[in-house]
Image (spheres, helix red, strand yellow):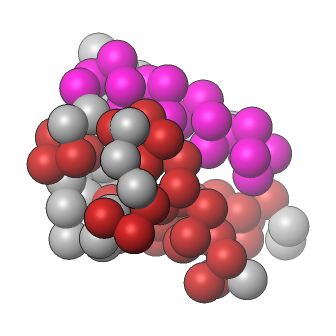
Amino acid sequence: MAADLRAQVHTILAEQAMIDADDVTDDQAPADLGIDSMGVVEAIFAIEEAFDIQVPFNANAPGAQGFDISSVGAIVAAVERLVAEQHD
């Protein structure tokens, strides 16, 4: 599941950045991919829909909600945590 989840998050972010998913790595920040703040919000909506989760994210205070968007890897880890919480 973890590899599939990671691949799915990479694909969502790649689609937002209009690049190939193979070009997305966990150490990149959304900005490194060319994703602006509006793109981050759209990616979060796509993540919520894809995984049927509620992401605690406020675009006006991105770091305040506990959903780390500092890197692709951090986003993957946050999604993994939310999915696990959802299924507990």
Can the viewer see residue 74 in this picture? Answer: no
Residue at 27%, 23% (x, y): give it: 37
Is 52 covered by the magenta stretch? yes
The image position of residue 28, as x and y in percent, is 19, 61
The one of 18 and 25 positioned closer to us in this rendering: 18
The one of 59 and 24 positioned closer to us in this rendering: 24
Image height check: is 78 above or below 84?
A: above
Is 60 covered by the magenta stretch? no
Residue at 80%, 45% (x, y): give it: 52
Q: How many labels does the image show?
A: 0
Image height check: is 23 above or below 14?
A: below
Looking at the rendering, the stretch of residues picked out in magenta corresponds to 36-53
Is 23 displayed left or right of 41 in the figure?
Answer: left
Magenta highlight: main SS: helix
Image height check: is 25 above or below 29?
A: below
The extreme left residue here reads 32
For the N terminus, the image quarter is: bottom right
The image position of residue 35, as x and y in percent, is 26, 34
Is 7 displayed left or right of 39 in the figure?
Answer: right
Residue at 22%, 46% (x, y): give it: 33
Can the viewer see residue 7 in this picture? Answer: yes
Splitting the image into 4 quarters, where does residue 24 fall? Answer: bottom left
